[in-house]
């Protein structure tokens, strides 16, 4: 490459936009929306990095990727080396590059964020990961010497996959027990193809299988196997079962035909492939219909955009706060808008009504923002007498998930928080039962892929420590050393 | 893959499968079901486990071919495999020493009733099992039920075998003649609704095994939700058995029809694959 640019020259460069499928075209297609940066674009974007002495971006990354280093390598054209840097801290970069809420993480703390044009770290991470995948450069890690220890991982979402990935590379035998017929958790049943192609998830899982991870499908722990049995058979158990219990609205009419949880709607379409013509699994026909989606998170965006792609005529997101409080990734909100999805803010459903058992209308209460609640977001409160109605043939409820009690109810000894999530030592993922670790959404409640992955990896490190020392109760100092490991 | 060790016809459009599923067999208790996928692109359907043998690792499933998936399943023979079998799911039946129990099974619902009868007999109850079908050919599991030691009364709608009339007629007669402590019902929704109506006036405790449409069977989707006493419950994890006097059977019947049109299209395709209807998108 030519001589390095000065800081001033770098500041003048424009942030490179991610090439996207045209909004009209993509509204009828499950093909991925973001097309990926070209090599040239990636290099140009990486060259904008100011190479801060104390890079703030790393502070924003939940798993502490050496962002400055990998970006410098991309700028130099050393993409394979950049991949190695990322891989040290992130086992699933092709996934995280696509679904992390970068604006609240690395890109939010980038010094250029003040000027509204942070380095496109997520796009670069994705570029690097896609490059090594499509070029077949995925390193086959050297097989470590078997330790003779065996670990059971329950759940194959990002938490379980990350935990399994680290433990197998340390030479332990790892078996992943998954309730569904396909591994991947929310990555396969929730997040749609147009945002995260399933082929990417399958590649990651195939990689783990090559390393020796055994996946046992249709294994509903608590039913097919008990936790007790796993504890007798394995040296340690990691619980990463996610937060898979959909919340409903608690208003009359919720059981009408035409009211879906986002989990059900997305599972039918994604996991069960109802978007393909020859699928055996049905989903209610939305062609030409009016759809409303309750919620303001990624799940709501995914449900709305999926409905659109299934042929809906009118899709509306109904959220009880305002746009500023929406937890969805900013890019998803923009994409949804471009595709023609309407947003109604400050409304909350009070009743769903139908004819012959089929949903027809939704009654809404208008809201205003009051005092901030415990999450710091201003709490919506009803405006007396301000009500309205919208016609709807299908309503998707995307207001979050609680912890699924299926496994937990079978282990009364396992300590829980007041929210019903598993109580753990955050740094180590250790639960109240020796040998049992937990992480991901089942600990935090619905959160993010990167946090689940980070928790899976911390737990893996803690499993190692436990297998080595046999000490369960950790003194505070040791906990810290595990966390920074 | 879960190998089918034996497949036999037991009635018109009804087959019995003995399937290798050792983990399911080991943990199974009466009242539980499995989620099955026939092939790698198939849909997930719930099927009640009628019997399980821990030693051989085999479970017994009774399948009535109605929709595409159940009809495809019924084309399988011994030596074939099911792609997925997950379970045992749902809460087991509450088996206690109640005294006298009546277990009503209609059609393939008899396969759900059978393990309950067995477990109740084993728990020391006097068990009267009333089973019914449209006609003689539709009556299943009669000799197996008799072998449990329960008193078995068979009815047929057309009177071709046993007592003529509906199971509910026989149930009403039984209740009039004997004090009954508990009634279990499994079968078509209208039958369970009718059973609940018969037992309600005298307040005989009645449990129905509900059969809503399911997807995952693990509590993740809420597609299986039913209304029990005004409260929404997920049949796959909170049930499938509920207090029949509190169940909104009309809602259940309606929700079970949600994909009626889709099923008809798929059924037609199964008969004649060339008539595949292209649907959007
Ligand atoms: C529609 C949707 C969109 C999202 N979009 C984003 C996004 O853009 N960015 C982002 O960062 N996050 C997003 N999230 C959140 C993110 O997906 C989750 O935080 C993350 O997947 C949690 O990972 P996990 O491993 O804890 O659990 P999950 O991914 O939920 O995986 C848990 C797995 O455990 C299995 N399981 C459950 N119970 C049992 C049992 N008893 N025995 C065996 N297996 C069991 C489940 O079947 C599942 O496969 C989204 C979530 C949803 C639902
Ligand atoms: S079948 Fe999905 S929650 Fe019961």
Image (tube, coloured by chain):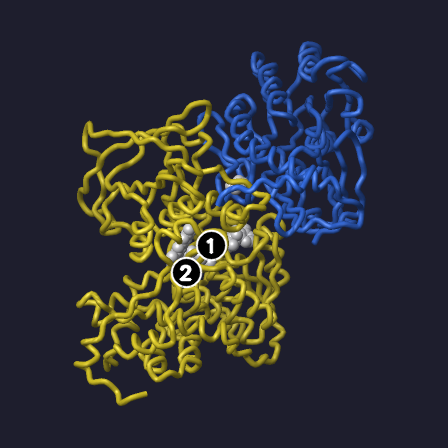
Up the image or down, A64 lies above or below B72; here it is below
Count neighbours of disc 2 (C-alpha within 10 A) and say few if under 14, some if 14 to 19, many if 20 or more. Answer: many
Chain under callout 2 = A
For chain B, the rendered hue is: blue
Question: Residue B167 appears at what percent x and percent y?
Answer: 70, 17
Pinpoint residue B46: horizontal percent, then vertical percent: 62, 39
The quarter of the image holding the C terminus of chain A is bottom left
- Which residue lies at the image location 57% right of the left edge and 49% below the top edge? A222
Disc ID at residue A449: 2
Shown colour of chain A: yellow
Name which of mark 2 and mark 1 comes first in the sequence.
Answer: 1
Indicate the quadrant of ligand 1 in the picture.
Answer: bottom left
Q: Name the residue under label 1.
A: A186
Q: Does the residue labelled 1 lie within 8 Å of ligand 1?
A: yes
Q: Report the front residue among A452 and A259.
A: A259
* Tag 2 and tag 1, C-beta contact below 8 Å: yes
Which label is found at residue B61? Answer: none
């Amino acid at each position: 490459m030519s001589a390095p640019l000065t800081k001033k020259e770098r500041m003048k460069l424009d942030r490179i936009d991610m090439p996207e499928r045209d909004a009209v075209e993509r509204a009828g297609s499950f093909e991925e929306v973001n097309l990926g940066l070209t090599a040239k674009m990636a290099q140009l974007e990486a060259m904008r990095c100011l190479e801060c002495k104390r890079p703030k971006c790393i502070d924003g990354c939940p798993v502490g990727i050496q962002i400055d280093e990998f970006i410098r390598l991309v700028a130099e054209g050393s993409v394979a080396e950049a991949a190695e840097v990322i891989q040290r801290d992130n086992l699933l970069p092709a996934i995280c590059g696509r679904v992390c809420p970068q604006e609240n993480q690395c890109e939010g703390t980038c010094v250029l964020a003040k000027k509204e044009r942070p380095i496109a770290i997520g796009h670069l991470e994705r570029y690097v990961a896609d490059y090594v995948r499509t070029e077949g450069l995925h390193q086959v890690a050297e097989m470590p010497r078997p330790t003779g220890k065996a670990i059971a991982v329950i759940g194959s979402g990002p938490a379980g996959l990350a935990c399994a990935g680290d433990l197998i590379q340390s030479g332990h035998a790892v078996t992943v027990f998954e309730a569904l017929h396909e591994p991947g958790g929310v990555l396969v049943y929730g997040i749609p193809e147009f945002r995260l192609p399933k082929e990417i998830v399958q590649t990651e899982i195939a990689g783990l299988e090559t390393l020796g991870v055994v996946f046992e499908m249709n294994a509903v722990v608590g039913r097919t196997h008990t936790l007790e049995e796993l504890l007798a058979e394995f040296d340690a158990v990691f619980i990463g079962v996610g937060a898979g219990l959909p919340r409903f609205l608690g208003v009359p009419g919720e059981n009408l035909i035409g009211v879906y949880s986002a989990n059900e709607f997305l599972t039918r379409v994604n996991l069960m492939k109802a978007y393909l013509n020859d699928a055996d699994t049905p989903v209610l026909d939305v062609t030409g219909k009016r759809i409303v989606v309750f919620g303001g998170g990624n799940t709501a965006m995914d449900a709305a955009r999926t409905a659109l792609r299934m042929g809906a005529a009118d899709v509306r997101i109904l959220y009880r706060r305002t746009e500023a409080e929406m937890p969805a990734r900013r890019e998803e909100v923009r994409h949804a808008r471009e595709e023609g999805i309407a947003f109604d803010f400050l409304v909350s459903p009070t009743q769903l009504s139908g004819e012959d058992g089929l949903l027809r209308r939704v009654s809404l209460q208008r809201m205003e923002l009051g005092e901030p609640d415990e999450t710091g977001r201003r709490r919506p409160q009803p405006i007396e007498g301000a009500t309205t109605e919208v016609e709807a043939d299908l309503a998707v409820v995307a207001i979050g998930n609680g912890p699924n009690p299926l496994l937990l109810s079978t282990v009364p000894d396992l300590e829980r928080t007041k929210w019903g999530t598993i109580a753990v030592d955050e740094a180590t993922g250790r639960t109240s039962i020796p040998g049992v670790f937990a992480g991901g959404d089942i600990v935090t409640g619905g959160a993010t892929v990167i946090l689940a992955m980070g928790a899976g990896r911390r737990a893996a490190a803690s499993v190692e420590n436990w297998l080595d020392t046999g000490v369960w109760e950790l003194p505070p100092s040791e906990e810290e050393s595990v966390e920074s490991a | 893959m879960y190998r089918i060790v034996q497949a036999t016809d037991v009635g018109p459009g009804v087959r019995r499968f003995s399937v290798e599923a050792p983990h399911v067999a080991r943990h199974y208790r009466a009242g539980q079901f499995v989620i099955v996928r026939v092939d790698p692109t198939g849909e997930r359907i719930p099927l009640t486990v009628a019997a399980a043998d821990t030693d051989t690792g085999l479970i017994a499933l009774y399948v009535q071919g109605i929709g595409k998936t159940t009809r495809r399943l019924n084309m399988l023979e011994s030596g074939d495999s099911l792609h997925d079998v997950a379970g045992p799911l749902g809460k087991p039946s509450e088996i206690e020493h109640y005294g006298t129990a009546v277990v009503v099974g209609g059609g393939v619902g008899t396969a759900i009733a059978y393990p309950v009868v067995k477990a109740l007999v084993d728990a020391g109850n006097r068990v009267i099992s009333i089973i019914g079908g449209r006609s003689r050919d539709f009556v299943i599991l009669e000799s197996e039920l008799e072998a449990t030691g329960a008193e078995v009364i068979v009815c047929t709608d057309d009177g071709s075998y046993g007592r003529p009339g509906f199971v509910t007629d026989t149930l009403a007669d039984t209740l009039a003649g004997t004090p009954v402590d508990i009634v279990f019902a499994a079968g078509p929704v209208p039958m369970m609704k009718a059973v609940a109506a018969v037992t309600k006036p005298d307040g005989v405790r009645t449990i129905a095994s509900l059969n809503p449409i399911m997807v995952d069977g693990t509590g993740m989707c809420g597609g299986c939700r039913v209304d029990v006493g005004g409260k929404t419950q997920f049949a796959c994890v909170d049930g499938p058995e509920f207090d029949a006097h509190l169940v909104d059977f009309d809602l259940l019947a309606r929700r079970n029809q949600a994909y009626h049109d889709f099923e008809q299209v798929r059924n037609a395709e199964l008969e004649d694959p060339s008539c595949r209807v292209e649907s959007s998108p």
